[in-house]
Image (cartoon, helix red, strand yellow):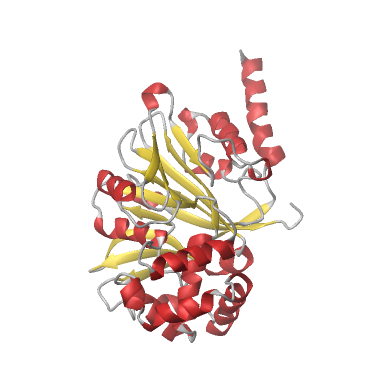
């Protein structure tokens, strides 16, 4: 019996030790955004923590590298009447950020569009053997070298109380990773539909026709307005005018966890936790879970293998961090890892990941 246990432990340790990526983690800085002040001013304090000359250089580099020339005429048309195309408070926040950092409104709008169409990631929702729901994610970007330096945890507050928390990048007014304390957590994964330039043009044309919305705004709307897991789940399933995306959402009660596969108009699939029947976790990357992942981007199978090696009895914040540190779940594009549990809001934490360039 003892020998079998030692063999099992050796296999588990071998899984993590032999395939983990060499990296170092840095605690993401944490700031407050006061929702009681005007949208134009509420990001000012956060932004002034950066050297704005360096910030402008980084953002300009990203925009020039990835936003196609054909997009700028459309962005110019949008910016002239931005509040007609983007709902409050997002247009006003973008305008305020542009003024604070010394960039054009069109550049900050382009930055937010770029964020929405270029994220690759891994999201996990899991229920441990005590019924506690956990949620964890890696967020991967081709812009990693730029974004790691502007990754932040943001506590959105009303009258001095945190009403929701996100992990974001300075200058991004939407949300890809968020928590409503004692209610739900939610993450976005891009549903791989093509290259960045084509995705930007598709989203811009849909915005002009008012047939699409920023998916990251939808997530922040849920955090702002929905009081429960079920309310947020219903919003993300039923809301129209949205780009192809995966939402992973987790609640505070057993079996409150789902991955929603969306196309532009509707939910194609809702994949839910079902612990009594053995489905105690869900793992989503950037491909429909009922189809095999592409061989050149298979983060799903190594992630599943790592989850099963940990097992339901031992799922917690530390073991989820280990799962999200297994190669290629952790890779050269990973910008940050967030671990959270809505029933335990203080667990929420984010580390920026700096990957060894030789990996």
Name the residue nearer the viewer: 144 or 19.
144
Q: Quadrant of the N terminus?
A: top right
Camera sees residue 293: yes
Q: Quadrant of residue 92?
A: bottom left
The percent coordinates of residue 108 (x first, y second) are 47, 77
Identity of the residue furthest to the right in this view: 358
Name the residue nearer the viewer: 167 or 262.
262
Image side of residue 141 versus residue 227, left or right? right
The percent coordinates of residue 60 (x first, y second) are 58, 79
Camera sees residue 42: no
Whether 99 is drawn above or below 299: the answer is below
Q: Quadrant of residue 33?
A: bottom left
The percent coordinates of residue 326 (x first, y second) are 63, 42
Residue at the image point whose x is 30% and y is 61% from the top:
162
The percent coordinates of residue 7 (x first, y second) are 67, 21
Image side of residue 341 versus residue 143, left or right? left
Whether 51 is drawn above or below 128: the answer is below
Name the residue nearer the viewer: 80 or 189.
80
Whether 222 is drawn above or below 248: the answer is below
Image side of residue 145 versus residue 266, left or right? right
């Amino acid at each position: 019996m003892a020998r079998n246990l030692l063999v099992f432990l050796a296999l588990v340790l071998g899984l993590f030790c032999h395939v983990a990526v060499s990296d170092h983690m840095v605690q993401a800085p944490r700031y407050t955004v006061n929702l009681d002040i005007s949208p134009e001013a509420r990001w000012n304090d956060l932004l002034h923590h950066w050297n704005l000359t360096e910030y402008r250089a980084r953002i300009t580099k990203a925009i020039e590298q990835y936003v196609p020339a054909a997009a700028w005429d459309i962005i110019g048309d949008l910016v002239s009447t931005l509040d007609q195309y983007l709902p409050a408070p997002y247009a006003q926040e973008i305008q305020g950020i542009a003024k604070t950092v010394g960039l054009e409104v069109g550049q900050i709008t382009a930055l937010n569009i770029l964020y929405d169409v270029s994220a690759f990631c891994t999201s996990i929702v899991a229920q441990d053997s005590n019924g506690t729901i956990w949620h964890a994610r890696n967020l991967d970007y081709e812009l990693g070298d730029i974004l790691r330096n502007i990754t932040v945890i943001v506590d959105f507050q009303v009258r001095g109380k945190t009403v929701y928390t996100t992990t974001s990048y300075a200058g991004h007014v939407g949300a890809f990773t968020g928590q409503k304390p004692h209610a739900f957590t939610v993450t976005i994964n891009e549903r791989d539909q093509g290259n960045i330039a084509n995705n930007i043009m598709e989203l811009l044309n849909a915005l002009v026709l008012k047939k699409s919305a920023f998916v990251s705004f939808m997530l922040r709307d849920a955090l702002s307005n929905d009081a429960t897991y079920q309310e947020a789940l219903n919003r993300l399933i039923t809301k129209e005018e949205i780009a192809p995306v995966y939402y992973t959402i987790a609640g505070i009660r057993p079996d409150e966890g789902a991955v929603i596969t969306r196309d532009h108009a509707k939910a194609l699939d809702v994949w839910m936790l079902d612990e009594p029947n053995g489905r105690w976790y869900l793992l989503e990357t950037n491909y429909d879970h009922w189809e095999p992942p592409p061989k050149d981007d298979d983060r799903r199978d190594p992630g599943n293998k790592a989850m099963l090696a940990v097992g339901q009895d031992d799922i917690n914040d530390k073991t989820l961090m280990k799962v999200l540190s297994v190669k290629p779940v952790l890779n050269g594009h990973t910008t940050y890892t967030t671990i959270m549990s809505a029933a335990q809001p203080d667990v929420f934490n984010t580390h920026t990941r700096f990957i060894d360039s030789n990996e």
